Image: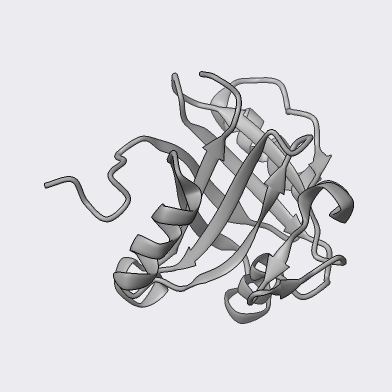
Amino acid sequence: MDGVIESKLLTQVAFIVRDVEKTKVKFAEFLGVPPPAVVDGGKFEITGTQYQGKPAPDANCLMAFFDVGPQVQIELIQPNGAQSVWQDYLNEHGEGLHHIAFGVKGMDGKIRACERFGLPCVQRGKYGNAGGEYAYLDARSDLKCYIELLENYSPA
């Protein structure tokens, strides 16, 4: 059985936080590593972020990443206050586990498969210098968190 997205490549476990600077220091202490840099989600001209199927030029966040395995990261996300899947989570639940992410190829087909499975796509965009794409699927009722699909366009 291949599963809905035909991937078992877990790449991230992500948390929504109110203060990424404070939280990254605690994670760094816990893991025994230096605190990582904080980056923002990028400019809308590159990301093309869509929230609930509509352009979301103001949706952004601050992020910090910890590499904790050969291909796994812990991601900390501080929403910027604009409407987004990140801000919605913070408003509704406070801080906590937001999503687990899987590496995929063929994003559009994977999103369609997830939607047929009952997981609607609630936010989507590109990351970095448009070298990859992300999509958040609302799996909270069945899987108890969001599922993020990540497709890196550059060769592995």
Q: Nearer the viewer, residue 7 or 91?
A: 7
Res 136 quadrant in image = bottom right
* Residue displayed at 61% across by 72% down: 89
* Residue displayed at 50% across by 26% down: 68
Horizontal side, residue 126 vs residue 95: left or right: right
* Residue displayed at 52% across by 43% down: 150
The spot of residue 60 in percent (x, y) is: 80, 58
Please, which residue is most extreme toward the left here? 1
The spot of residue 47 in percent (x, y) is: 77, 50
Q: Nearer the viewer, residue 17 or 127?
A: 127
Q: Is residue 12 above or below residue 37?
A: below
* Residue displayed at 44% across by 19% down: 70
Q: Nearer the viewer, residue 112 or 61?
A: 112
Judging from the image, the colouring scheme is one colour
Q: Nearer the viewer, residue 29 or 74?
A: 74
Horizontal side, residue 85 vs residue 9: left or right: right
Report how many numbered discs are placed on residues in the image: 0
Res 85 quadrant in image = bottom right
The spot of residue 53 in percent (x, y) is: 64, 75
The spot of residue 80 in percent (x, y) is: 83, 63
Q: Is residue 67 above or below residue 102?
A: above
Q: Is residue 87 above or below residue 23?
A: below
